[in-house]
Image (spheres, rainbow, N blue to C red):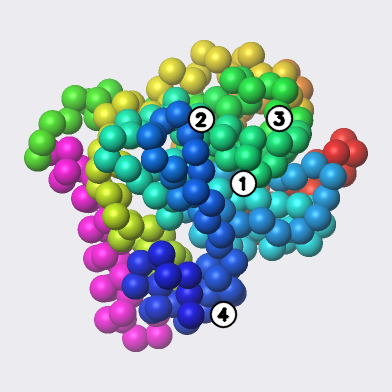
Amino acid sequence: MLTNFLPSQVNQLTDPKAIAFLQSIQRIALATSVSQYPILTTYIRKGRGVTPIVLLHGFDSSILEFRLLLPLLAAQNETWAIDLLGFGFTQRHKEITYSPTTIRIHLYNFWKTLINGPIILVGASMGGATAIDFTLAYPQVVKSLVLVNSLGYTTSPTFTKYLFPPFDFFAVEYLRQRHILALKLARTLPNFNAKILLAIQCAMLHQEMPLWNDAMISYVKTGGYSDLANRIVQLDKPTLILWGEADNILPLGDAEKFQRDISNSQLIKLKNCGHAPQLEQPLITSQHILQFLNNRDF
């Protein structure tokens, strides 16, 4: 039986690896300054190593996006994945304003409570922006960075800050409805690719969590990490930039900007790969990350 706090739709999954990954999810009642109540925060921890790797997922996503990458990393190093505040399966409270600031505070409290030592941050898409923001705020915590098709220079449209009811609800609900339509289509087509079906199921599972709409609306209205671009040059940590060349969400030029602005950085472009190397090329992605860490003796 799967963890009882997950949505009932989890029982529709048939992939053994995805099920095993979900069964390894843990929760901690995390005390933070962003809420008067503890926040039930979901995470996974596997493997052993001197310096833990911490994986940060992208926008409107969850730790499930690391279901293929985390086991590969954990085979050689202690590896964590956390559902960021307002996202994934981490608990949401109505009184919280979900923003880069509250995400950073929540992540710091998670680190302080469960890890409390130097870490290697790996951020994918929006998780990359979170990793950068966290590193700039707490440089003593982070030994090195890995940015995977990271947000940082490309920002969301400014009009999202000014959405008001009911348009804010419709804008966010669109994210869920596109997954529902894709899932219905997949189930009606004969011999549909099982991997794509699983990807759709995993991508929409967290959207059934309580207060998902409220948290998403709150975050979108803040404008997200729109003020990050000018601060990236302040990074001085060893940084690996991994970028799928066929990314149709963030331009390849952003990868080259990261390499230009981060003095101690290395860029590796992944051929025949799009926006999510952690799902599209998990083995190659893990090899690059582990080689980067091994070369620096973390």
Over which residues does the magenta segment extend?
167-194
- Most common SS among magenta residues: helix
Dividing the picture into quadrants, the one containing residue 113 is: top right
Q: x, y (%) of residue 248?
A: 44, 44
Please give the residue where the numbered disc 2 appears in the rendered image. Answer: 104
User: Residue drawn at (24%, 65%), measured in percent from left and top?
Assistant: 181
Can the viewer see residue 194?
no
Q: Which mark, residue 39?
A: none
Q: x, y (%) of residue 174?
A: 22, 50
Q: Which residue lies furthest to the left in this view?
A: 166
Left/right of residue 255 with respect to residue 168 in the rendered view: right
Q: Which mark, residue 16?
A: 4
Please give the residue where the numbered disc 3 appears in the rendered image. Answer: 142
Label 3 vs 2, first from the N-terminus: 2
User: What amino acid is labelled 4 in the image?
Assistant: Pro
Q: Distance between the residues labelled 1 and 2?
A: 14 Å
- Give the total number of marks visible in the rendering: 4
User: What amino acid is labelled 3 in the image?
Assistant: Val
Q: Which mark, residue 55?
A: 1
Label 1 vs 2, first from the N-terminus: 1
Q: What element carries label 4?
A: helix
- Evaluate if marks 3 and 2 touch, with contact meaning CB atoms under 8 Å apart: no
